[in-house]
Image (tube, rainbow, N blue to C red):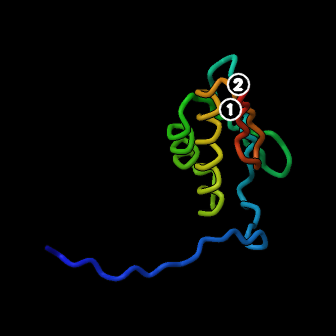
Amino acid sequence: MIEKPPMKLIKAQKISSEWKLDRKGYFLIDPRTDEGLIYAHYYVNKEYVKSIVGNCAESIYYTILREDMVSSLMHAAYLGSELQKAELHLKLKNSIYVQDKPLELNNE
């Protein structure tokens, strides 16, 4: 049996001051349950440029990367997380999606 090395743990933390806007622009994530689709609306300098649309977070973020629409790893990680949350919202009929907020479940 191979012995596992001791773990080296780093406490995860979000430091808001580390966030920097991506020089290539930003996205507004717009999941539409009536269509079963997620729209990632792309803006540069506060002007709308185009939208990526799909029903799967993975296909949308791969398209964003392929189209070279992000320059920051932090922004790419954020988009992956936000798009996954939007996809989950489409699948759950009892949720409320708000970008930059935790997914809210209506447990009635």
Tell me, yes or no, whether the two marked residues, 2 and 1, touch with CB atoms within 8 Å: yes
Residue 73, compared with residue 31, is above or below; it is below
Q: Position of residue 39 (x, y in %)?
A: 68, 32
Instruction: Classify residue 75 by image quadrant.
Output: bottom right
Instruction: Classify residue 14 by image quadrant.
Output: bottom right
Point out which mark residue 7 bears.
none
Mark 2 or 1, nearer chain start? 2
Does residue 83 appear to the left or right of 19 in the view shown?
A: left
Residue on which the image places disc 2 = 32
Q: Position of residue 56 (x, y in %)?
A: 53, 33
Q: Position of residue 102 (x, y in %)?
A: 72, 47
Front-lying residue, 95 or 73: 95
Tag 2 secondary structure: strand
Residue on which the image places disc 1 = 39
Front of the two marks 2 and 1: 2
Q: Name the residue at 63% across, 41% down.
A: 85
Name the quadrant of the C terminus. Answer: top right
